[in-house]
Amino acid sequence: MNKSTHFDGIDADFLHSSAGPPVSIEGVTPQDPSRFLNRELSWLAFNWRVLGEAGNTNLPILERVRMLAISNSNLDEFFTVRVAGLREIFRRGFEAISMDEMTAADQLAQIDTNASALMDEQQRLWHALQSELVDHDILVLNREDVTDKQLEFVKAFFETQVFPIISPMAVDPAHPFPFISSGGLALALNLKRKDTGKRLRALLPIPAQVDRFIEMPCDGSGCQSYLLLENVLLLCIKDIFPGFDLENFCTFRVLRDSDLEIEDEAEDLLREFETALIRRRRGEVVRLNLSTDAPADLAEMIRNALGVDAAEIYKINGLIGIGDLSALVDSGRDEHKWPTY
């Protein structure tokens, strides 16, 4: 049997044929920084391709929503591990230059620009997908869209499923800003007492034990309607803070450093991991997502309480925590998804 394979006179038997003499390429050196791709920026380029699938009209509509959610979950992990590690290098003053001739500060600056554009594109795609979902009888309602009949359902749902597990907190000198875990979503509120006019700042963490997208009862039109859990809380705010009027509010979400630092030569590796996991829960904030309409006083309170720099704050004009859309996909109709394998 002839082991050699030929295509147009070229020997394709790579295991047995000669590689030929080396060729020198003019103007190219192995150490040229332009030959290297930065690992972090390359990862962001990959996530842009994931996000691109959300705009792929060849996919079923809910699979496009799923790809949008995945791109956001990916980005969260990127910030809590990779960006957190880079920021630690920067804060310690290490000026080492990578093979692509970028310092940690250079990489962080480019990541900030790239990731901001990516998050803007996520919001643009979500806005477009919402319009397409309406055409498929899937609605994500705003507070003003809720009908009287749906409001009755919301009140009952809040009383039985939400009210027992929420922890509203005043924020003042006697009640310091509480700890918000990584991935935690919360409402910051400015309230005014009806009888005295006294103002109160409060924090209302959005409970993770309840699905964020609450399916509303069918109104007979055949539509699937959903209401965000934070909108349920806002519709029932008078039940949470009786005697107060809501003046304004904002939504925010925290991501913390989740990078594990393990001492390989530790005497007790199990205990080393346990200590690192406990430390990770209370890691420094690496990203604060804040709604763009946040009142200045609430934004300042949150920023100071969490100790974040301006570079770590991302203003979001739309849905904060787009990764939660995966729950909406899972509860949606099968005809708008790929067939189950």
Image (tube, grey):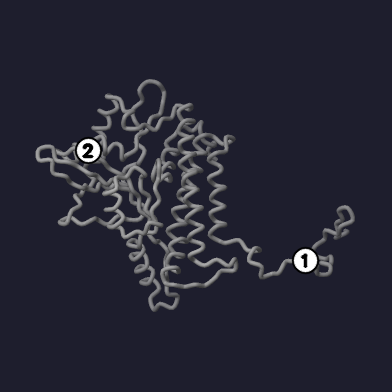
Please, is residue 18 above or below residue 235 in the view?
Answer: below
Placement of the N terminus among the 4 image quadrants:
bottom right
Residue visible at 40% across and 77% down?
Answer: 266
Q: Which mark is residue 25?
A: 1
User: Residue 239 at x, y = what percent?
Assistant: 18, 37
Placement of the C terminus among the 4 image quadrants:
top right
Compared across the picture, whether 276 is left or right of 19 comes to left
User: Residue 280 at x, y = what percent?
Assistant: 36, 63
- State which tag comes first along the sequence, 2 or 1: 1
Query: Badge 1, how many Cα within 10 Å: few under 14, some, many 20+?
Result: few
Name the residue carrying label 2: 237
Q: Residue furthest front?
A: 296
Label 1: state its secondary structure: loop
User: Residue 166 at x, y = what percent?
Assistant: 24, 45
Q: Residue furthest left?
A: 195
Three-letter code, disc 1: Ile
Q: Foreground residue, 131 or 281?
A: 131
Three-letter code, disc 2: Ile
Q: CA distance from mark 2 to mark 1?
A: 70 Å
Label 2: state its secondary structure: helix
Query: Badge 2, how many Cα within 10 Å: few under 14, some, many 20+?
Result: some
Q: Which mark is residue 133?
A: none
Task: Say how many tags the image has.
Answer: 2
- Disc 2 versus disc 1: nearer the observer: 1
